[in-house]
Amino acid sequence: MPVFGLLFIPSVILSEHPTVALFRLFTILIYLFYLEYFFRTTSTSQSARDRHFILIEIFRFVYFVPIAIYLINTPTLGETNIYGEQSDDLGLTSNNFGWAASFYFLLTIDRIKNFPNSKFLALIDVLTLPIALYLVIISGSRSSTLAIALSGMLLILLRRNISLTLKTGLLIGMTFIYLLVSSSQNLALNRHQGHSKQGVVNKESRLLIWNDIFSIVSENPQLLLFGVGPDNSTEAVNKYKHRFYKVHPHNTYIIVLFESGIICFAWFVLFFIAKPLIFYFKNDASHFSYILHPFVISFFDHNLGPGQFLAFPLFSLIFFYLYRSSPSLAVRDIAVLK
């Protein structure tokens, strides 16, 4: 954590607004230190299994709230395409509803599979799954559909009691469903027009910003080394490309690279992405499928720092697995279990 913060300092100093960049870096580090402290503390008092159960229950509660809000606001479930719409009262977009519902969907499946409960509570869990999946589909969130598809494919591939023929068929079927649902912003569920307030299909703004960023870095190699400063990516794109973007690049990894430089980005990927995921694939991939969700969504949204919709589960899982992979904690877990 201290090294990660220090590697940001050159980009802060060279930023056009050093004070703003320093404040943004400060808010990010305070948030990450809080999460690190939380998981370091709980790792000394509970077993890994108990911590995992608590984490899943916290995530399920937090991300069921947007689902419940949508159901309360639309009790008839009559809207069959909410792509591009935004809740004026809550500030939630269709993507937010899709991300929450897809995350809850995977969490609930893992909860049922790995932590048996009473029949009544298990029945409630099962009944919420179709509602969550329905909200994913009508939200038009292709990243949410992709996260579910990748998690499901991984689970199929790692199951030993499924024949190769059945695995192949299931993978082809899941790929077909993903392409059917996500190939167009006018969803497969609602091919006729008129239900969505957004009648015109817009160009993919993410790709336009990403292309501009890669173009800027290729034309200004010094930016690859030092970055443009925390929370300065949108302004930098507008400056170098004379654009008028009002949104951030919607990609956590590109943002870290563009705002902090290649050295800080390498540190971030090595310790915050690669290390937790390697431990996950070695130990939990055949049991839990929800882990991939926030890492996949981070390719399509900015989840670095407080206030971002999926920053909480992303960095919670990072610190959870960093402490799971610590050799000293294995002894503590054994002691706690005894």
Image: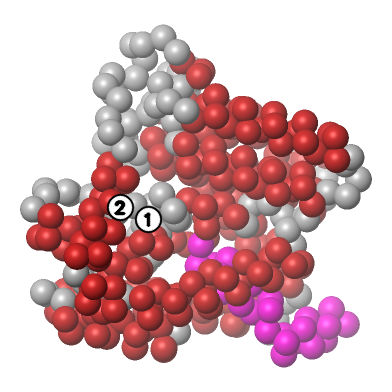
Q: In this view, does 208 lie above or below 201?
A: below
Image quadrant in which you'd find residue 54: bottom right
Q: Name the residue under label 2.
A: 210
Q: Which residue is drawn at 76% across and 67% down?
A: 283
How dense is the environment of label 1, judged by Cα within 10 Å: few (below 14), some, or many (20 and up)?
many
Q: Is residue 75 left or right of residue 176?
A: left
Residue 137 within the magenta-colored segment of the rendering: no
Q: Which residue is drawn at 46% across and 22% down?
A: 187
Is residue 72 visible in the rendered structure shown here?
A: no
Q: Residue at x 11, y 50 (%)?
A: 243
- In-front residue for pair 28/73: 28
Disc 1, SS:
loop
The reply to whether the C-beta atoms of the residues labelled 2 and 1 are less than 8 Å apart is: yes
Q: Name the residue under label 1.
A: 251
Disc 2, SS:
helix
Q: Which residue is drawn at 51% across and 18% down?
A: 189
Q: Is residue 41 above or below residue 279?
A: below
Residue 322 within the magenta-colored segment of the rendering: yes
Which residues are drawn in magenta?
314-338
Q: In this view, does 293 lie above or below 6?
A: above
Q: Is residue 279 left or right of residue 84?
A: right
Badge number at residue 13? none
Q: What residue type is labelled 2?
A: Trp
Image quadrant in which you'd find residue 115: bottom right
Q: How far apart are marks 2 and 1 (CA)?
A: 9 Å
Quadrant of the drawing holding the N terminus: bottom left
Q: How is the image coloured?
A: secondary structure
Q: What residue type is labelled 1?
A: Asn
Measured from the top left, where is residue 227 in percent x and y?
25, 74
The overriding secondary structure of the stretch rendered in magenta is helix
